[in-house]
């Protein structure tokens, strides 16, 4: 039903823009690229809105840019704001909280917008959307996008690279299919593998260079552990927000740690990544600080405060 509703909205639009959250990751970006492909297959112009902070997706962007068919896929927030009109459809992916939008001005200007997200509903949800597809039981937005694509067109013509982007999004949010992976997750992954998605190429998207790896190692080394709870503070030289999340993931691989929080000061803001195994709900804790996510994986960003 959702897929058919989205398809109808696309047909009724002059063009489609896709926007995600600040500091996009592979779930946000992979689902954007996948959905852009099906929008074009339906015969509508489509652009993905990208800002300057793309560190976590640079590897995949570099692969896309090797193919000329993606030359005009990306558009800056400034260009999008100027081009948006009353018949533009804005698809918001992997976010619905106003505070985490890549560009709230664009979202508020769009008269026709829909949300596709897997995070628990926030009180600060974007208002005025004509369709909300928020599925908290999905592993990832990429899983949701993969399902939508299969129902929107009879024979999706996703390229191998686009399928790898979606598979990378699922891989990231399930921690390599170890958490939140249900039957539908594996069905989506199977469909993407059938399109040629290479798991080795997906793995490469998450490799760290040596400097990043050493920063993550120093973050883990700083951890103080009490009764299964680990709190770690990243060194000042950490400059990429996604590295705090990587460090938190690694901490949970250590025996005796059931819950962890990693704090990092990046560009004057405090980034907090929370992870847990079992019953501890890091989402509720970080929601109280204005963040969000899921029970076992959440984050928050604090402004005008020191790490102390």
Image (tube, grey):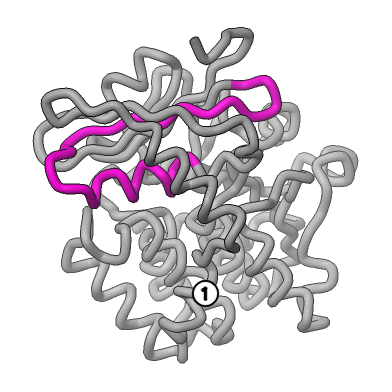
Compared with 173, 193 (above or below) is below
Residue 154 in the image, given as x and y percentages of width and height: 44, 84
Compared with 230, 117 (above or below) is below
Q: Which residue is mark 1?
A: 204
In this view, the residue in front, 110 or 147, is: 147
The boundaries of the magenta stretch are 244-269
Compared with 132, 288 (above or below) is above
Q: Residue at x 33, y 50 (%)?
A: 250
Q: Residue at x 43, y 24 (%)?
A: 291
Q: Quadrant of residue 2?
A: bottom left
Examine the rendering and report whether any part of residue 131 can be seen: no
Q: Residue at x 51, y 67 (%)?
A: 207
Examine the rendering and report whether any part of residue 132 can be seen: yes
- Quarter of the N terminus within the rendering: bottom left
Residue 158 in the image, given as x and y percentages of width and height: 55, 82
Residue 188 is covered by the magenta coloring: no
Mark 1: few, some, or many residues within 10 Å (few <14, many ≥20)?
A: few
Residue 219 in the image, given as x and y percentages of width and height: 45, 38
Residue 32 in the image, given as x and y percentages of width and height: 58, 59
Residue 260 is covered by the magenta coloring: yes
Q: Is residue 161 left or right of residue 268?
A: left
In this view, the residue in front, 272 or 118, is: 272
Q: Is residue 141 left or right of residue 126?
A: left
Q: Residue at x 18, y 38 (%)?
A: 257
Total labels drawn: 1
Compared with 2, 239 (above or below) is above
Tell me the SS state at disc 1: helix
């Amino acid at each position: 039903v959702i897929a058919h509703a989205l398809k109808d909205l696309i047909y009724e639009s002059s063009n489609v823009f896709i926007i995600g959250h600040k500091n996009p990751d592979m779930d946000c970006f992979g689902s954007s690229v996948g959905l852009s492909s099906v929008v074009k297959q339906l015969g509508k112009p489509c652009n993905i809105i990208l800002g300057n902070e793309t560190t976590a997706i640079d590897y995949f962007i570099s692969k896309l840019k090797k193919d000329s068919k993606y030359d005009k896929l990306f558009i800056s927030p400034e260009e999008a704001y100027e081009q948006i009109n009353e018949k533009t459809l804005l698809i918001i992916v992997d976010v619905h909280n106003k505070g985490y939008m890549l560009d709230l001005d664009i979202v508020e200007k769009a008269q026709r917008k829909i949300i596709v997200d897997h995070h628990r509903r926030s009180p600060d949800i974007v208002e005025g959307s004509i369709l909300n597809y928020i599925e908290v039981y999905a592993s990832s937005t990429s899983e949701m996008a993969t399902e939508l694509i299969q129902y929107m067109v009879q024979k999706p013509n996703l390229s191998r690279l686009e399928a790898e982007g979606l598979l990378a999004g699922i891989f990231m949010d399930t921690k390599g299919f170890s958490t939140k992976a249900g039957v539908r997750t594996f069905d989506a992954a199977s469909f993407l593998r059938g399109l040629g998605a290479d798991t080795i190429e997906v793995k490469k998207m998450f490799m760290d260079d040596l400097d990043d790896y050493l920063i993550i190692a120093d973050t883990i080394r700083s951890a103080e552990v009490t009764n299964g709870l680990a709190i770690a503070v990243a060194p000042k030289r950490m400059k990429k927000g996604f590295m705090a999340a990587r460090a938190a993931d690694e901490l949970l691989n250590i025996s005796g740690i059931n819950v962890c929080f990693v704090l990092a000061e990046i560009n004057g803001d405090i980034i907090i990544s929370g992870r847990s195994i079992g019953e501890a709900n890091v989402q509720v804790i970080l929601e109280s600080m204005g963040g969000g996510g899921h029970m076992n994986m959440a984050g928050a960003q604090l402004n005008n405060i020191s790490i102390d």
